[in-house]
Amino acid sequence: MARYRPIILEGLLMHEGRQLVLRMADGGQWRLLALGKQDHLLGRHVRVEGARDGHDIVAADKITAK
């Protein structure tokens, strides 16, 4: 059974192919699983709240502009 591992991240929201990606200030990046359209937030610094769902994947519950 998978454990819920909550996580809060801040970074630059980008598209990489058809995948949403959060680029961190330290050079790291996370792939995001998110419902709905996030196009209005692309290229902006955002805060992502959700659950870690693997090595570099976050299932986003909430994405807000900083």
Image (spheres, rainbow, N blue to C red):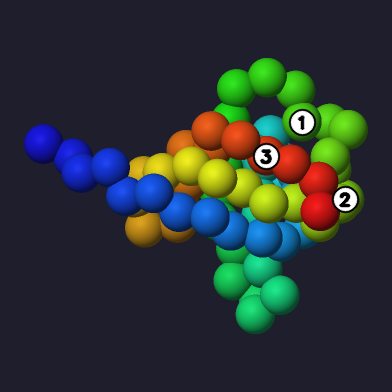
Q: Earlier in the sequence, mark 2 or mark 3?
A: 2
Label 2 close to label 1 by CB (< 8 Å)? no
Name the side, left or right, on which 2 lies relative to 38.
Answer: left
Q: Earlier in the sequence, mark 1 or mark 3?
A: 1
User: Residue 20 location in percent, x, y?
Assistant: 67, 41
Secondary-structure class at tag 2: loop
Mark 1 or mark 3: which is in front? Answer: 3
What residue is drawn where x is 55% and y is 45%?
49
Q: For residue 51, what is the image quadrant?
A: top left
Residue 33 visible? The answer is: no
- Judging by the rendered image, the residue that carries numbered circle 2 is 43
- State the mark number for residue 59: none
How many numbered callouts?
3
Decide: is 21 above or below 59: below
- Of the 4 image quadrants, the one containing the N terminus is top left
- Judging by the rendered image, the residue that carries numbered circle 3 is 63
Query: Nearest the camera: 51 or 13?
Result: 51
Q: Residue furthest left?
A: 1
Label 2 close to label 3 by CB (< 8 Å)? no
- Judging by the rendered image, the residue that carries numbered circle 1 is 38
Secondary-structure class at tag 3: strand
What residue is drawn where x is 58% and y is 30%?
34
Label 1 close to label 3 by CB (< 8 Å)? yes
Secondary-structure class at tag 1: loop
**Label 3: how many Cα within 10 Å (few below 14, some 14–19, many 20+):** some
User: Residue 16 location in percent, x, y?
Assistant: 71, 47
User: Residue 35 location in percent, x, y?
Assistant: 60, 22
Q: Earlier in the sequence, mark 2 or mark 1?
A: 1
Residue 60 visible? The answer is: yes
Residue type marked 3: Ile
Name the side, left or right, on which 3 lies relative to 23.
Answer: left
